[in-house]
Image (spheres, rainbow, N blue to C red):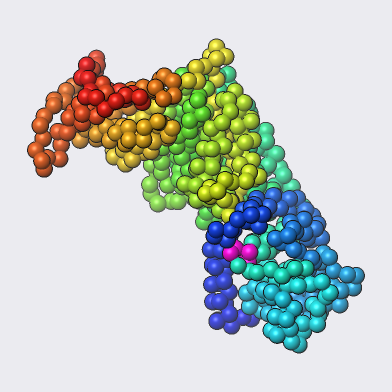
Amino acid sequence: MAQVGGGREQGDSEAYDAEMRQVEALNRLAGPAAGATGPVAERARHRGADLLLTGHALAQVESLGEALTLISRMADTTLPLRSQAVFRADREVLHCVGQFGLQDGESDAFRLPLDTAHPAAQVARTGRPVFLASPQEFRDRFPATWQLSDREGCAAWAFLPLTTYGQLTGVWMAAFDAPVKVTEGFGAFLLTVARLLGRCIEQTYDGQADRALSQSLRSSMGRIGSGVDGLSVAARYVPTGGGLMVGGDWFDSIALPNGRLGLVIGDVQGHDVHAAGLMSQLRTAIHAYAAEGHGPDAVLVRASHFLASLNEGRFATCIYLEADPATGILRIARAGHPHPVLRLPDGTCLLKHVRGGLPLGLDLGEDDYPVSVVSLRENEILMLCTDGLIESGGHDMYSGWLRVRNALTPGSADDLDGLADRLLNAVVAPQPSPAGDLPATSFTEDDIALLLLRRDPSDGYADGTGRHLRFTLAQDQAQGLADARIEFQGLLHDWARPEQVDTVLLLVSELLGNVLIHTEQAAVLRADISGAVGRRRLRVEVTDRSDEVPHRRAPGELSSSGRGLVLLDVLAHRWNIRPEPEGKTVWFEIDEDGADEPSEAL
């Protein structure tokens, strides 16, 4: 399409920019009306899913006619779409280049100068959408040209800007055979469809070269290995948003020396062919650095320098880990990427907080990617994903995490591929939500990459009845206190007595804080839950390598320390201090069905 609206005045340009910002905001808010019930509200809850599926399908089309046909399939009682047309400008004339549902000859007869008082021409000049709720409104606002669209059966119209390659290049008309109200996200819904259509037009213009690149990159990710002896891997990639078949998200599996396994997942900024090209280069570079035998921190440092050296002005988030199948030890380095999720054998899911550095490619002189050590027990699963899995469908990081947790929890760890498929289905085709749940309210133009790593049972069977948590807090990780509290909340998410959860969080904070304040050592925390639901026992141990044994004191009213053992004595059911060959361990136990009796110091 030729660029239109290039001669907009400054006021129009500012208004256009403001409109685009408003579109972004509306896309995040699009959804059912507050308090809406019944079939209309239920249908509105699934508009985000409809857009996701349509965007995926639009990535496969090769013509504008196919694209309009796909869009027409979204029509229903809440979207009474009758016909469509796409207009573009050749020099100063607006004419139709594609249509669906119009009669023979209607589109061919449509040819207007850009300065005509017609809604399509106005959109092409200003970049602002025009919504006409009735034939009377059309007649009142555009009396000179309304006859051009006065078709029998049309009750409302929407004229929306089409943007390709960052420029306003055309107009999409949607005509409806029933009245519609552009409220509560419906306008944002149509604007998002127009954005999808603009992306689809870009794709058809980009030609077969970009499609071949996209298909090649996607095919290469489909060839990821299933793991090594003792470690199983499942991976999924879903292109979303209606752009190329692949964007900036990627994953890889790398065979390392001594039988170890390297896994990487990342996301290059952007969702265009340029992001796909950079992703391919970065993926190859990381694979090479890892295969050379460099540790996780060194791999990310080198990858960051490599991306910065390309001078493309883009960054990438990434997690790289190396796994030892014999011990289950994972050494993880993170560059601005979402934290992993740890699924315990009984289905409990925890956000596993690992230390991290800046995204790759930000040449700020800070090449610090600390390595976190995580021990993966038998039948435990570590999930790595890009933010598209979490935030698609209008979710933020918190509500998206809840959706991921609910999809990952059910089922057996034996079916790794089934878990991966269920996670994707929760995003691509969500089930109806019970009242009060957060619905998927808008469409997110982002790819989804997903990796699941499971440590396989050595004898084909692992006990899935207990829960275990391991956490190491170094002296320079004071912020890790908050991370430990979050992981404990996940560990005790179904504890029968919520007040005991608060007690545990207090005691854990106190014990870890004491190590940070009174020693120069790291704190190693171990938590184990055993027993039947309702009668479970939680045991927490905090070990450090300091030989200084804490003593119970009677702190003054304004004292800032000396309360740790007092709290243990009052709140824990049992506790004690155990000398170690090097250092000491302070432990306590809480019984789920225990009364609030005084604790026993053993």
For residue 281, side relative to residue 397 (left or right): right
Percent x, y of residue 123: 67, 76
Residue at the farthest top position: 459
Q: Residue 506 sits in which quadrant?
A: top left
Does residue 342 lie above or below 146 as drawn?
A: above
Does residue 54 lie above or below 475 as drawn?
A: below
Q: In terms of depth relative to the viewer, which is nearer, 408 or 292?
A: 408
The boundaries of the magenta stretch are 184-188
Q: In terms of depth relative to the viewer, which is nearer, 76 or 175?
A: 76
Percent x, y of residue 150: 81, 78
For residue 506, side relative to residue 149 (left or right): left
Percent x, y of residue 55: 69, 53
Q: Residue 98 sits in which quadrant?
A: bottom right
Q: Can residue 262 be seen?
A: no
Residue occupying the point 55% across, 29% down: 453
Residue occupying the point 58% across, 74% down: 16
Residue occupying the point 46% across, 27% down: 330
